[in-house]
Image: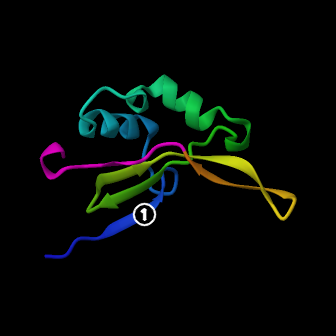
């Protein structure tokens, strides 16, 4: 039986930030700031370049959240010109079979 894995951002996959926080709480061995909703709002939605949107990248398998990685848009220099791109803020979390 094959499964379908879809990768995208939380908005495109219709995943609420609360579900992301719960995912970290369920799959991280110790307490972590990313399971605290107010922290995630501050870290991922409050930065001016994020304009109120979180930039999490998610992997969903057959409707179940399987992986999360937090990203923030940041300036960087390329050939002396400022451009913007994602900066990885988390090292990601992956669900174990027994955690979901």
Q: Residue 56 location, x and y as percent?
A: 50, 48
Q: Residue 16 location, x and y as percent?
A: 44, 41
Quarter of the image with the N terminus is bottom left
How is colour applied across the structure in the image? rainbow
Q: Is residue 37 left or right of residue 73?
A: left
**Quarter location, residue 6:** bottom left
> Looking at this rendering, what residue extends furthest in the front direction?
79
Mark 1 neighbour class, 10 Å CA radius: few under 14, some 14 to 19, many 20 or more: some
Q: Residue 60 location, x and y as percent?
A: 34, 58
Look at the picture and state if 77 lies above or below 22: below
* Residue at x-position 29% and y-position 57%: 63
Q: Residue 75 location, x and y as percent?
A: 75, 49
Q: Is residue 36 left or right of residue 26?
A: right
Q: Is residue 52 left or right of residue 37?
A: right
**Quarter location, residue 35:** top left
* Residue at x-position 38% and y-position 34%: 21
Q: Which residue is mark 1?
A: 7
**Quarter location, residue 52:** top right
How many numbered marks does the figure carry? 1
* Residue at x-position 12% and y-position 47%: 98
Q: Is residue 21 left or right of residue 30?
A: right
Look at the picture and state if 33 lies above or below 24: above
> Looking at this rendering, what residue extends furthest in the right direction?
80
Of 36 and 84, nearer the camera is 84
**Extent of the magenta region:** 89-100
Query: Does the stretch in magenta take in 12?
Result: no
* Residue at x-position 28% and y-position 37%: 28
């Amino acid at each position: 039986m094959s499964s379908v894995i879809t990768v995208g951002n939380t908005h495109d996959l219709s995943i609420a930030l609360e579900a992301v926080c719960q995912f970290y709480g369920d799959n991280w061995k110790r307490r972590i700031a990313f399971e605290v909703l107010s922290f995630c709002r501050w870290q991922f939605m409050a930065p001016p370049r994020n304009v109120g949107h979180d930039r999490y990248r998610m992997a969903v398998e057959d409707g179940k959240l399987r992986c999360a990685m937090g990203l923030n848009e940041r300036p960087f220099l390329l050939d002396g010109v400022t451009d913007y791109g994602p900066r990885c803020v988390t090292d990601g979390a992956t669900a174990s079979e027994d955690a979901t």
